[in-house]
Image: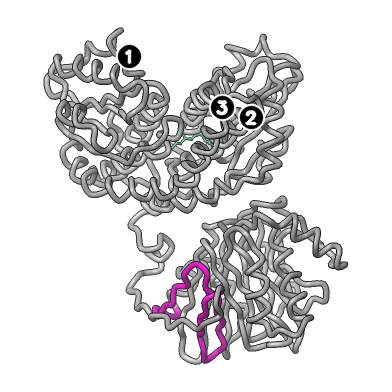
Amino acid sequence: MCGIVGYVGPREATSIIMEGLKRLEYRGYDSAGLAVIQNGRIERRRDVGKLANLERRLAESPVSGHIGIGHTRWATHGAPSMVNAHPHLDCAGRIALVHNGVIENFLELKEELLDRRHVFKSRTDTEVIVHLVEEAMKSGKDLLRAVMAAARKLRGSYALAVISADEPDKIVLARNESPLAIGIGDGMNFAASDVAAFIERTRRIIFLDNGEVGYITPTEARVFKLETGMEVRKRIVELDWTPEMAMKSGYPHFMLKEIYEQPHSIREALKVQEKYLDLITEFLDRGRDVFLLAAGTSYNACVAASYMLSKLARLATTPVIASEFTENYGKSVGIDTVILAVSQSGETADVLAAIEHARLSAATILGLTNVVGSTLTRVSRAYILQNSGPEIGVAATKTFTAQLTVLAQLALRLARKRGKLAQYEIDELKDELEKLPELVEEAIKISDEPIKKLAKELKNVGSIFFLGRGISYATALEARLKVMELSYIPCIAYPAGESKHGPISVIEPGYPVFFIAPEDPTRKQVIGNVMEMKARGARIYCVGTEGDEELRENSDWWLELPRVSEVLSPVVYVIPFQLLAYHLAVEKGYDPDKPRNLAKSVTVQ
Ligand code: M6R
């Protein structure tokens, strides 16, 4: 999730682009760059790290012009380095392009372009696009038609802004699945992945939709359908957002924005490259002992993954809280041990310390992370990126469901490799995986209002119980963590079947007990556990599958979600609990983006 800015008009482009990039820096900060047309040539400046580095470079070597594009990067393909920083140029240095998104078929496209003697300077997926535009322009197309021709070859997500020294008053734009907006000014126009970039200069916005391309000049903004080339009459929206609201796309908090972003982030997580999935699958298959190592929310994803791997691939794994690993398993680690470390940040000290210990004992380290270039990517034998973009809210939401989505793909791939599932079962699960973004969208729609009301009812309770059986135990763990860390209400999570072995003694009349009970093989037993709690006077809150009358009748509060296969259910059934945590925090007057005493990345042991 990178940030894109474009400007064309009578003012100095560099300062307007830098101002926009500053507003977008929260979206990514591995590197930044801009390209401006100066005296008929493209001038580019780039640097790694924060924008201040690019500012310094510009001070040393200024550029001046009236049209330009800029980019702040959150790396997905290719390490965060100078050569991988955007904008990327074609072979002749006459076209510059910035991109946000992931191009799935970039390797095939790159091969074709290499055959045609294109020279690549970076390891990004983006660079293929600028060479495709170059190819099309060589065949006589203007910049707009050339970008259209290039975009038609792309599979994946993109927001693009492109300039050419041969058409020095035009920025061409294209969008598929990654946001892009045009700002209409007076004798000048703007483009950005996020209106926050230019909201202080204009509030008149055209939002591009998927499959649209367009261009801006100082006086024109036109949009076309990529498929047909037909012009689209777009509505200009007048936004009354403050810059602060614009950064959050109009949501009051980053956390809510990130909860609502999940259909998109799950779609991105489904684009993990096959070769990396294959590589990790290969290592998992070879291990004698396989540990899933993580902290916090990532640990809860590991608990879910252990059910997925066992149910689909018949692989027994041990999920371990990172800070306990060395004491508990340190002496048993050896050359046959495989460790899949899951860490959104890739920098959690407990995870890195455990890995270091295991590495010294010759274990194989694999990683799943959101941050390319993080320590985890450097110490892993192989790693997968989950493509979630930066998560600003301290509480993990979209990165959790993305982790689950990647882990489910791994489990499915291992099941296929081991021949543990019939072809029709594999096909069904693949279809369900593809449907996850829509299911999550529906779950958000269904849950938000009733949960907001529920938060008012629950805001003064002394503690809350979360119960689930099977893979829903992992959902219960995550529900507990979210609600507890944001509302500061002490919470308990247990496997529903275990609650009678002790925790049930805390139940007294009216005590709130949540059951996560999607329809799966554990449902009958879950009903038994509901009865046990009811008999002690607990107030039963149940999230179950649509049409489950028996559970609904036995609940004091009931929310039903779409049907989804057992192993994927945490992705959908965690949604109401993310919302509950958020609304409880707001009801209680706490900041959901910055819960007290917590840091986004815990880099001390
Ligand atoms: O970056 P990581 O995934 O390694 O972070 C792990 C935990 O610190 C993190 O999940 C933490 O528990 C969050 N507060 C969860 O919302």
Question: Mark 2 falls on what kind of element?
Answer: helix
Q: Which residue is mark 1?
A: 497
The amino acid type found where label 2 is placed reads: Leu
Image side of residue 432 versus residue 465, left or right: right
Q: Earlier in the sequence, mark 3 or mark 2?
A: 2
The quarter of the rendered structure image containing the C terminus is top right
- Tell me where residue 468 sits by quadrant: top left
Relative to 302, residue 98 above or below: below
The span picked out in magenta is 201-226
What residue sits 31% from the left and 22% below the top? 523
Relative to 219, residue 526 above or below: above
Compare residues 269 and 224 and report the one nearer the observer.
224
Image side of residue 485 versus residue 568, left or right: left
Q: Viewer-nearest of labels 3 and 2?
A: 3
Alpha carbon distance from label 3 to label 1: 28 Å
- Name the spot of residue 584 as percent of width and height, x first: 26, 41
The amino acid type found where label 1 is placed reads: Gly
Q: Which residue is mark 3?
A: 421
The coloring applied to the image is one colour
Alpha carbon distance from label 2 to label 1: 34 Å
- Name the spot of residue 101 as percent of width and height, x first: 59, 59
Q: Which residue is mark 2?
A: 352
The quarter of the rendered structure image containing the N terminus is bottom right
- Name the spot of residue 385 as percent of width and height, x first: 62, 43
